[in-house]
Amino acid sequence: MITRELAVALRDAGLTWHPAEGDRFQLDLPDEVELEAEADVFTVSGMTIEARQSPSGTDLAFNGTTEWALDAVTLADAVWLPREDQLRELLRGTFRALVRLPDTFRVEIEIAGEPLTFEHPDPAEAYGRALLALVSRSL
């Protein structure tokens, strides 16, 4: 799983999230709201947390199965933690290879003819860093 810091950087760079069953996220509430659950990782699931469309956008509705009281949060109050397969898919045609090295993984992409590599011990984090480079250049 990618770090919260990388997930926030991806969001801030313009990566949009359309919640789907199985997606993981953390809460990202204003600083004045003290909520221990901000560190918890939640999963979108029809049984517990549903993505519901409202006139103002998408809300993540908690279906009463969590141990603390929260009815719903907006998408802006959540940080998506994309899975490795989702990150790879988002790289689309820029993805060239995932290489296993002795102590790390290297993701190779190509953007506008320029080969780029990103290494990290966690392959999801390497994919995420590659995606951040792609999204940042797409602005």
Image (cartoon, rainbow, N blue to C red):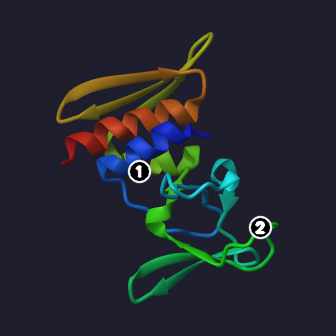
Dot 1: few (<14), some (14–19), or many (≥20) neighbours within 10 Å?
some
Ranked by sequence position, the earlier of labels 2 and 1 is: 2
Taking 12 as reference, is 101 left or right? right
* Residue found at x 17% / y 36%: 112
Tell me the quadrant of the picture where the N terminus can be found. top right
Q: Position of residue 29 (x, y in %)?
A: 52, 58
Q: Position of residue 49 (x, y in %)?
A: 68, 73
Taking 79 as reference, is 133 left or right? left
Q: Work out which residue is located at the far bottom of the displayed protein and give it.
A: 55
One can see residue 101 in this view: yes
Which of label 2 and label 1 is nearer to you?
Answer: 2
Taking 139 as reference, is 110 left or right? right
The residue closer to the viewer here, 11 or 76, is 76
Give the residue number, with chain letter if any, for mark 1: 90
- The three-letter amino acid code for the residue at tag 1 is Leu
Q: Position of residue 62 (x, y in %)?
A: 68, 75
Rendered position, 103 above or below 36: above
